[in-house]
Amino acid sequence: MKKIILLSTFCVSMSTSFAQPIPHQSIEDSVIGWMKVYNFKGVKTGMKVDDKVYSANQISICDSFVNWMQASYLPKGGLGDAKKSVREKLGLYNQHTAGKPQSYGAYANTYTFLKYNSSRKMVPENNLGIWWGINANGIPGDWPVRDICTPTQYYFTMPTAETEVDDEKIKKMLDLKNNANIKPYISFWVKNMGFGGGTENVILSKDNRSPFIKITRAEYLQALETSIPLYYEKEKKKISEARRGNQRDLEFFLKQLDEKIEGFNTGLKKNREKYKNRMGELAMTSAQPGLADLSNGRDVFSSQYLTDPESNSERYPVYKVDPAMAELCKKDKPQWILVSWDYYAYDPTEKQQHEAIISNFNFEYVYNFFFDPEKVKGLSYKPLRSPYTKEITVVTEASEASKKNTADKNIHYFEDFSAIAIGKKPGGWRVQYGLDGGTVEKPEGLNGNWLLITNNTITATQIKKPFPQNFTLTYDVVASQNFTWGAKGLTFQLSKETSPGNAESFLNLKLRPGFDGKDGETTLESKFPAPPGYSNGTKWYAAPGFSNNKTNNRITVTIKKKEEMLQVFIDNTKIAEYEKAIPAAHLFNAMSFSSGNSGGNDKFYISNIKITKD
């Protein structure tokens, strides 16, 4: 029988000899792939974990999950590995999971912290990475209602985007209901516990029947009542073992326990009295409720933090698995399939995995394989789109200005994005973080192509390094009409990096447009610590002629470095000059633009970036 990994014991162990950590920025745009493509063929024997017996057919389903995942996704920005899994073995800290239905499946990690081993081979530096799982009879998220879970019944909540995400733009992006590949099935996003982000979840079940049932107030209060004596016996045992031989302490802590139990029972009685005529309503409570909610007479169905105790913004339904479906989970055929994956849109690795899954993974085939097998009889799994298909880069003819500047030996670098098709990301630049932007556009009223920057960081990757010792650098900036006054600006940075993203020295110029025709603001920050005596700190200046009242608010920024001197111009107006700003022999080797975003009007466009040798 092939080795099965229990989720609770998975780890990666690699030799740390001569380990060289790899900066993530240097690989986030690189297709690194899988440690191994397994091509599992199924197994002939099953296995047992605690009281759960997994048949050979169930373990063979895990094989299929791994094969389907690897056929649909090619890890980018990290090193991928996939493992089969069954439910974790019960131990000291997970007894509350005993009532979960029998589940089994597979998961993939794309490890994003990598290093070179002694053989110069990429290996994981730790076990942190981007997760994707497919599970038969799985439960989304990790939000158990621990105190009321029993060996035969598991209760849980699911904080979703509807209550957990305030930004309507992000909420819409997390909603997969309009994705043609996923639309026929149940889908929702669930917040991660204890840290940012969350997981997208798609449930495939016969006739879209949800395996999860929302329980009533009556059932929830009954579950609390049942859990009180169980809690008492467990705590009494812990106290008795810890205070053995110390009668005085034993009596003191047992008395405290009795008082706590009395508080639980009193609170339970008050809740039953308050809701005696509303017991059939759904149980709506906090994300992780428990017996402690009964203390101090608290209403277990209302939020103690809100003015409106009936508000749903901090209250969640309590779920259990449909008992009829849970019993059938022991059979070879899954009752439902849960496909889940990490998704935090500002992380480039999570974003590219998300896009690969919703574009490539063949949800329809998987549904039919289990719930309408005649439709796929004799057919092997194929992704909707192969992850090995390279996107065709659409290149248009470069402008005359681009041709002329490229041919000029005195021009170190020139980019007007004229050779990039509209709507595409520019070659030679790494685009990071943003939900929007980072694409080449042709704004109305402007000649030529422009790169949209809105909540993005873009870094030049195909530029000759280092830059000239003395140079004149110019770029054109456009701020959109009605740009929000006081919103985040556009930051341009020249730096000398020791490794990608790690600047030991830099020149940082930030622009924000004014309003109603008034001048904008310029912030000039510099860091040149060695040798001492050069520019270090922040200065503020006006940005003449840069406002938000026109359709396109355009300026040209010029930065001149000659020996130790630094000059900054906006259009033809010199706004700053430093006689001793930068060491004469200093050589920059990195260039980037970045901007935050405060609203739909807050867009910057850049073009005509030019570095001339002086």
Image (spheres, rainbow, N blue to C red):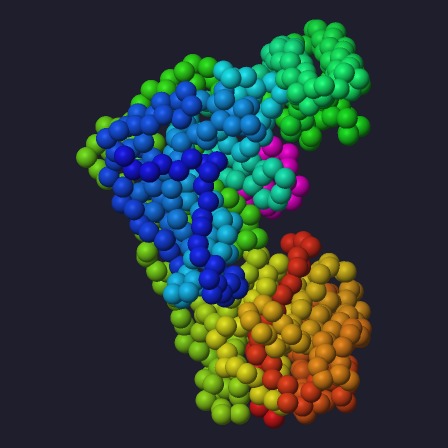
Rendered location of residue 218, percent (x, y): 63, 10
Residue displayed at 45% across by 41% down: 10
Percent of width and height locating residue 572: 72, 85
Q: Quadrant of the C terminus?
A: bottom right
What residue span does the magenta drawing correspond to?
158-177
The residue shown at (55%, 53%) is 347
- Residue 165 part of the magenta segment: yes
Q: Looking at the image, which is closer to me, 116 or 459?
A: 116
Q: Quadrant of residue 6?
A: top left
Q: Is residue 400 above or below residue 196?
A: below
Among all residues in the image, which is located at the extreme left? 378
Seen from the viewer's position, the closer of residues 484 and 271 is 271
Picture quarter with the N terminus: top left
Taking the magenta stretch, the answer to whether it contains residue 288 is no
**Is residue 137 visible from the viewing direction of this image?**
yes
> How many marks overall?
0
- Given residues 79 and 596, the one toward you in this image is 79
* Residue 206 can be seen, yes or no: no
Above-or-below relation of 220 to 426: above
- Which x, y percent locates residue 282? 62, 17
Q: Identify which residue is drawn at 59% across, 61% down.
A: 456
Question: In x, y percent, where is residue 126?
Answer: 50, 52
Residue at the spot 55% in from the left edge and 32% down from the top edge: 142
Foreground of the two, 283 or 589: 589
